[in-house]
Image: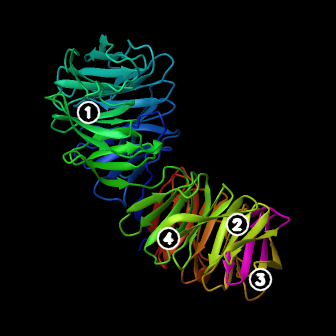
Amino acid sequence: MAEFSLQAVFPSLPRTQRGSAVVLGTTSAGDKIQYCNGNSVYTIPLDARNTADVYTEHAHQTTCAKTSPTGFYCASGDIQGNVRIWDTTQSTHILKHTIPVFSGPVRDIAWDSESKRIAAVGEGKERFGHVFLLDTTTSNGSLTGQSRTMNTVDFKPTRPFRIVSGSDDNSVAIFEGPPFKFKNTFHEHSKFVQSIRYNSDGSLFASTGSDGKVILYDGASGDKVGVLEDSKGVAHSGTIYGLSWSPDGSRIATASADKSVKIWDVASRSLEKTIVIGAKIEDQQLGIIWTKTALISVSASGFLNFLNADEGKIDDVRQGHNKGITAVTMSADGKRIFSSDAEGHLTSWDISTGESTRTSPHTTMITGVKQAPNGDVYTIGWDDNLKITDASGGSPRVFSLPSQPVSLAIADDVAVIACYKHVAVYTGGKIVENPIDFHASCVALSKDTVAVGGKDAKVHVYKLKSNGGLESVKVLEHGGEITSVAFSDNGEYLVATDLARKVIPYTVASDFSLTHTNSWTFHTAKVSSVAWSPDNTRLATGSLDNSVIVWDLTKTGEHPVIIKGAHPMSSVNAVLWLDEKTVVSAGQDSNIKIWNVPV
């Protein structure tokens, strides 16, 4: 029987940057989409929310990824101008080639219909585009003729082959080949060209730009054959970051900074539907793709909008995180997970399906989240506030904290917040401040016993008085700064982890003596979080070394269960037990993973 298995992944959202297009990829079957965040490339099935394939081999931040028409290889680019071509059929994703294309970020990648040639464009010093052969990586022509960064590229899917590209010099270029050589440029746009795409039979291609225009061209010659515009003489009132043809080539969907997606009928050059996504800045649309099974756009918030082109409405929105996750906790009823991130967002996940809803209680990093038995959600953030949101929703109650909060623990209706220079206690509807002479880093609470970990390499144990005051009970010395503390559910044990990579459990009843004398130092870097299993016998720790380790108090001398590379290329920021056999881990890579760890 395996020591552990991965049960579910709640994947990161695409990385977004206001003012930059998000390039989405798809598979030949049209049942998955691809996008990038951090150093990873995500391949997400459209019919499931709790699984994803994550490629993590890039050394630098990824920018775009496209799968070949055959489906056997994926080409992904990063901000250093590297294109990696890797196998999609195996879970190990064997690398075929790495090609340093140019010196700046790769903005877009295109495959030819035979899966033999790849074109990549972006920011460079000597050149802005390159076309090469898959098997040998040798050049297959020259993509020169545009004087500034090339933002977008596409291959004509039928012979005679053409490559078209759009650039920051406001031009659209067409190249003939193979081998590809410059044929002509077209200056139909008055601002940057953002996206350019061929239809499925290669008879037409379309370009969009920051001027809000959509221009149609003949697929072979590049001659302008029409424009798509509404009654105001433009397609959108803002920059159009993306366009995508319907699989049958009869319609075009455009995504714009004016916070809408529009569906156009190509034959009549008329507007069919306008789908308004929202009214906030984060509702700007930065990318779009029309696969064989769905039409999906990306908001500036990172949300994936599943759109119904026929009825002109939003069918579904996938929410979550695209910045590092800072804390996780389980809901009082055990059916949901709450996770917080470095931008002040709080996401509630349905554990069984992966459905999610996101709110933003804080404007800065949230450092702790807990749900009380009555359903109230407590959050603390770097805006130096404790916010309590009722189970029914509505605007939260806000309590100002005396210094920057770093950790949160609750028991019933009492909350203890470890702040930089104070331990704040929320009780009876108000905050009680307890100044301390060390810098706190973490806190745990069990009935009336409070454990505060400090940067002074000590665990300070206090008795919590009914008025919210603290009375010192014991100080436990460690060999390094304390990084996390936790009491077992039954209150019998306290565990502390430190910067020296140690995990040390104490027995509360025997005056916090060591529970065992074995050295638990299997992590190879700082331990960032710790959690007890509901049966009080096992511990899970997450670390900067990408791994999760499960320790057993009944077998202290045996080798623990090590989930090596639980979050590759990322620290594990938070761990949580759902039941005696299920561990949740959340990482700096914005992913939440659920592991089955049998006893």
Image coords of residue 9 (percent x, y): 42, 60
Image side of residue 471 versus residue 227, left or right: right
Marks 2 and 4, how far apart at CA: 21 Å
- Decide: few, some or many residues near mark 4? Use Cα within 10 Å; few <14, some 14-19, many ≥20: many
Q: Quadrant of the N terminus?
A: bottom left
Task: Name the residue tied to disc 4.
Answer: 583
- Above or below, 215 against 77 in this view is above
Task: Name the residue tied to disc 1.
Answer: 115
Q: Residue at x 72, y 60 (%)?
A: 499
Secondary structure state at the residue bearing disc 1: loop
Marks 4 and 1, how far apart at CA: 41 Å
Q: Nearer the viewer, residue 211 or 599?
A: 211
Marks 2 and 1, how far apart at CA: 53 Å
Q: Identity of the amino acid at label 2?
A: Cys
**Looking at the rendering, which quadrant does residue 490 occupy?**
bottom right
Q: Nearer the viewer, mark 4 or mark 3?
A: 3
**Looking at the rendering, which quadrant does residue 247 occupy?**
top left
* Between discs 2 and 1, the one toward the N terminus: 1
Q: Residue at x 47, y 71 (%)?
A: 392
Q: Nearer the viewer, mark 3 or mark 2?
A: 3
Q: Identity of the amino acid at label 4?
A: Val
Marks 4 and 3, how far apart at CA: 34 Å
- Which segment is the magenta one? 436-461
Task: Name the residue tied to disc 2.
Answer: 442
Extreme residue in the right direction: 437
- Above or below, 386 against 559 in this view is above
Kindly indicate whether the residue at mark 1 contacts the one at mark 4 (C-beta within 8 angstroms): no
Task: Name the residue tied to disc 3.
Answer: 465
